[in-house]
Image (cartoon, rainbow, N blue to C red):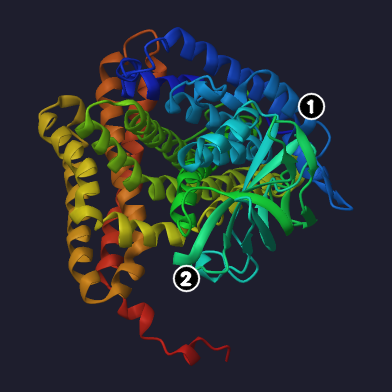
Amino acid sequence: MPSYKAPLRDINFCIKELFDYKDIQALPGYEDMGEDLVDAVLTEAARICEDVLAPINQSGDLEGCRWENGQVFTPKGIKEAYNTFVEGSWTSLAADPAYGGQGLPESIGLMTEEMICGANTSFSLYPGLTRGASILLHTHGSDELKDRYLPKMINGTWGGTMCLTESHCGTDLGLLRTKAEPQGDGSYLVTGTKIFISSGEHDLTDNIIHFVLAKTPDAPAGIKGVSLFVVPKIWVNDDGSLGDTNGVTCASIEHKMGIRASATCVMNFENAKGYLVGKLFHGVSNMFAMMNAERLGVGNQGLGVAEVAYQNALAYARDRLQGRALTGVKFPEKPADPITVHPDVRRMLLTMKAYNEGNRMVGAWIARALDVSHKEKDPVKKQEAEDLVQLMTPVVKAFFTDCGYDVANMAMQVLGGHGYIKEYGLEQFARDARISQIYEGTNGVQALDFVGRKLPANTGRYLRQFFHPVLVFIEENKDNAALAEMIPLLVKAVTRLQQATSYLAVSALRNPDEAGAASVDYLRMFALVTHAYLWAKAVKIAAPKVSGEEGLFYESKLETARFFYTKLLPQTSSLLATIMAGAKPLMSMKEEGFGPF
């Protein structure tokens, strides 16, 4: 059976050393959120994840959800774990205190979310979707709707979903057919079918609040005619009590490759009563309040699965005895050496470690910016933080989840044949990780959004929030002896990224296919340079502490950074070459040329 241990030491490194948590505590509203409180929250979250959620991860996958006559039953142990989760107020960590939330910083909420995803990805989706739905309602809902729904969504009594996809439209939401007929009392009757709805139906909460994209009879064609409606499974009376069922039914659940303890539903709405959220015809833009939160959450899924996969691969590699080291026997007292002595196994373990710790640093950086964007009073600093979050959200979603799947597959490879069978759990991690590259906008869509929208937005203003701190760091640390190996390599990588950025800025104006052809490679290149910047910052912090009480931890940082710079960062050179090759190698093929022959 696989195991999970929350990476608390590394999380604390990101929160308190790489970035000074006191800067977050100085923000308005966070004055009482001291490090002692943060330590208590993270430590207890780790306990819940290790003792409650992780032990039912494999059994939940084996059993899966069950659909019977419109009802969905979650696997054994999920409901009890959810009740424990709610009783501990884990659903309300970073939510608004005005509606029963605890008001903790987003950075603490997101670090906790990584642990939940690592312990049990399927479970994470139930509170995770509700959290995203509550953010959406909090951002765009009327005071009446917020008062009616938010308190019980935040305390976990009610669940929440986002209902976008239909059988014929996913990314292109302008094609949706779900209708919303206005009624005389200000409500709407919603009719249509939505597919792939995570947590659309389950047995964990008293009610489920659906946020549904639909079109009114007078809607303009395409995406400009889409509006957003809140449609509860069970109607909520004016006094907050539950009323009648509301024309919302689950027609079936999907039988999936992974996340099998999470209910993925086909939802039918038959004259289901709901209310408009925000303005008419602003549905898609309003939904992005939830989508952006969910994309950061899905990035955490990738990181969480990658972490648990790495931990189990490492444990196996230390125990598995096979052959002898190429340079001679290392453990003469044993019949063979553990496979950690073999260079290729070390390559895989170090790759996993470097990506996981690098992504955790990136996540901490963006979570910190999210806190600043919410609480900072200085309009300039607030805007700068918002710009960084906007820029990096597709990078977090796409790169973290690509790494999640790649790391899970590498972990399977470390185990060899044992990785391919269910007993050891690695194959589940690979299956669970795969969906994160697909939902909340496929990673190809994230890359296209990154290149096509984020880069040119406001004449490149978002990019300044990345390049400026990186270039300042290089200038300030060019003579730092601890970074003597890395600064020249960082300069080269940043130069390549600037060259690719300039190329896209010109070529994409001439031919939009150039942006599409380069998008995936460019996003990966951007992520690798981001890692390089943060690994250099980590080395600057770790180097003076190697001789201290936690010397091994800091020495590990230096060695992992060195591996990243010499073995992973060189990818930026080949990525630049593929970007500069342009769109022609992709677009010149005739449609018929694809075959089959």
Q: Which of marks 1 and 2 is in front?
A: 2
Callout 1, which amino acid? Glu
The residue to which callout 1 is attached is: 80
Q: Which of the image's four quarters has the N terminus?
A: top right
Among the two numbered marks 1 and 2 on one chain, the one whose residue lies closer to the N terminus: 1
239 in relation to 248, above or below:
above
Question: How many angstroms separate mark 1 from mark 2 (CA)?
Answer: 46 Å
Q: Residue at x 37, y 14 (%)?
A: 551
Q: Where is residue 320 in the image (x, y as percent from the top left)?
A: 65, 34
The residue to which callout 2 is attached is: 220
Mark 1 and 2 residues: CB-CB less than 8 Å, in contact?
Answer: no
353 with respect to 430 (left or right): left
Q: Nearer the viewer, residue 367 or 273?
A: 273
The count of marks equals 2
Q: Nearer the viewer, residue 133 or 569?
A: 133
494 in relation to 54, above or below:
below
Q: Which element type, helix, strand or loop, lies under badge 1?
A: helix
128 with respect to 568 (left or right): right
Q: How crowded is mark 1: few (under 14 residues within 10 Å), some or many (20 or more)?
A: few
